[in-house]
Image (cartoon, helix red, strand yellow):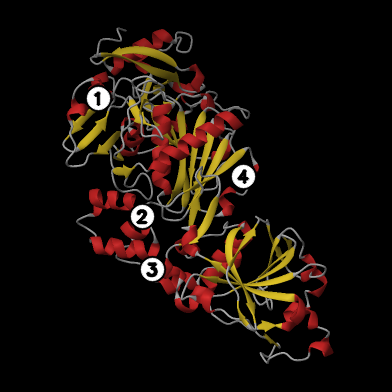
Amino acid sequence: MNPENPENRQIFCLVLGDAIEKSFPVDIDKGMTVGHLKELIKEKKKNAFANIDSNELRLWKVDIPIGMENKNTKIFAENINDYKGVELLPNATMETVFHKESENTKFFSIRIIAQPPGSLSTPMKRPDESQFYNREPVTSHEEEFWNELSDAYIVLKLPDNIDKTMFVSGPLSEYISVKGNEIVLSNCVMLNAQNELILNNGEPVMGELTKIKMNFVKFLRLRKSPYGIVYGISTQDILIKESYLQMIEKIEYDCTHYEKRGCIIIGSPGIGKTHFSLYLAFYLARRYSPADIIYEQLFQGHSRALHVKPNISVMKILDLTREFPQDSFYIADSVISAPWKTIFTFLVTTPKSGRWHEFVKGHVRRYYAPIWTEDEIWDVWNVTYKTEISENRVKELITRWGCIPRRIFDEYDEEPKVDDVVSQCDAYAYLKNDGGDLGDNYSGKAIHIIPNIDFTDKTYVPASPEICAGGTLAGKFFEMVAHDILRKGGTFTVRQLTKDGIKQPEELQLQNLPQKQFRNINEIVPGYYNIPENVNFESVDSIALQRNGIHHLYQIMTAETHDIKVNGLSKLENHLKDLPIHLYFVVPNMDDTFNNFRFQKYVTSGNIEYSGWHLTHTEWIRDNIAQYVLLINLSDFN
């Protein structure tokens, strides 16, 4: 075959009953008939078809990927329909049989099954033979989408007043083109985390000495709409957030320097984690071509995994337990990832620990994805939603829910009620797993994950001042956030409370402590931030013994008064010896509560002012516990 002749091509064939690894190539041209192809196959397989005329063969057009994972699989007659099997008539030409397929698209797939006549038509299977082909074809539309993913365009939006001369002439014109107010990058270049133009292999386009920065709003423009293919994405233009590029760079660095084989990327519900996972698939297809990618996500309530061989085949994996994809990248989007050994596994999820509980035990690293910036919200609004959602409505939603694209672009006309969301937040489930039970329905709407600069740690913050000040709900919500902030430590403003005057504010330094929940007071230990499982525990919300040489008690609240029940404190006597005791009333920066807070009185369980100190031997509470008010300025944690 002359490979330069567009009328010629090569296909792979297989004799029915043989293993996939025994497939063989046949050269064809577009004018050849199926009858002629039978003669070529018979000539290639003289031993298999001895004493059989070529016209007795039955040929089936199929689509079976060839790979290490299925090389030992044998193909039988009853399986032909599983591979898009279509029997071919002898007078059909190769042009009509393969007229919709490019030469390269199916090069590494078996396209023809040759079936002998008679008793050989359904070969007997041996008990130890592989009898299950773990693949199922996808629709042609879906196959085209994934095959064309690496050819998606990176599009940069230019300001109206910019001079475009430098982009349309000189050496840059080899890598970019200008169309209206857009720069379109060629498919041999991308952008790195510094917004520098790089070749797909990661090298600067002009060498190390001349790095070209493209600091413009950028989108990934898919060749086909992902609607109905990638759940949760319907638009063809996907914003490329700065954090996408930065996280990928960080993950690649850690993979190289710390020999990690996988990672978990955790983000607040509604920030577009599937957008990131799709951009990641694009990046892997470009940067590590021609590597295989397994992409798994929830589809109509069920996990659906696709094996993407770029520009070759796209097949649905039927049973993940039968796979050994050590030569593939694996992206698991909001599912429990399979325990595979792969080139690298990316689990992209909300803080639902059930999805990554087992996976995190392996040699993996954890990263936290940021919410959007206001600029990113407005960039997408300008491009996609300007005529659909009013500017004032966007501002209103940002003020209430923060920069969460799902709240703004998907739920703008069916916004949840603040009271409903905050009232359903479960502070204790939230704290139990360090946010591991933060869910889409309630807590995830009210609390945002804010990562540190390298995405390896995080802080939980309220979605907005309005959420935090949700009337009678504010106390419950503030308690959730305050526990996390107090446990992690930092610098806080405090003021001592006395009966006879107002002290000046001072600074308090608190170190980071691990969290521990206790069922009874005997489980309280020094060196931990101890939280009672019982929500009705009297007098305090948390305890940190021997913190900076002082026993710390914390009562979290939003009101300006909170009587102290002596009965609850008396039970802690054996834990509060030998060191000073400070009781901190923890308040938010709302309604000037910190400045207005005063010394609190001690009461009985019936809320009557306490007087029986000597009778109950509880005078140590009155005499040894110093009261303070501690301010948590929530704006400091946004």
Q: Which numbered disc, 3 or 2, marks the residue closer to the eye?
A: 2
Q: For mark 2, what is the residue?
A: 405
Of helix, strand and loop, which one carries label 2? helix
Lower sequence index among marks 4 and 2:
4
Of helix, strand and loop, which one carries label 1? loop
Task: Report the amino acid beneath label 1.
Answer: His
Task: Report the amino acid beneath label 2.
Answer: Pro
- Which residue is at a point 41% across and 18% down the rendered structure image? 13
Image coordinates for residue 229, horizontal then vertical, percent: 35, 44
Q: For mark 4, what is the residue?
A: 360
Asked whether the residues under the numbered discs 4 and 2 touch, taking CB atoms below 8 Å apart as contact, a structural biologist would say no
Is residue 259 visible in the rendered structure shown here?
no
User: Considering only vertical position in the picture, is 385 above or below 324?
Assistant: below
Q: How many marks?
A: 4
Lower sequence index among marks 3 and 1:
1
Q: Which numbered disc, 1 or 4, marks the residue closer to the eye?
A: 4
Question: What's the CA distance linking mark 3 and mark 1?
Answer: 52 Å
Image coordinates for residue 287, horizontal then vertical, percent: 42, 27
Residue 246 lies in quadrant: top left
Task: Report the amino acid beneath label 4.
Answer: Val
Classify mark 4: residues with Cα within 10 Å, few (<14), some (14-19) or many (20+): some
Q: For mark 3, what is the residue?
A: 416
Which residue is nearer to you in this view: 276 or 537?
A: 537
Q: Is residue 128 left or right of residue 279?
A: right
Image coordinates for residue 220, horizontal then vertical, percent: 31, 38
Question: What's the CA distance linking mark 3 and mark 4?
Answer: 33 Å
Q: Which numbered disc, 3 or 1, marks the residue closer to the eye?
A: 3
Classify mark 2: residues with Cα within 10 Å, few (<14), some (14-19) or many (20+): many
Q: Which numbered disc, 4 or 2, marks the residue closer to the eye?
A: 2
User: Which disc number belongs to residue 99?
Assistant: 1
Task: Report the amino acid beneath label 3.
Answer: Pro
Question: What's the CA distance linking mark 4 and mark 2?
Answer: 28 Å
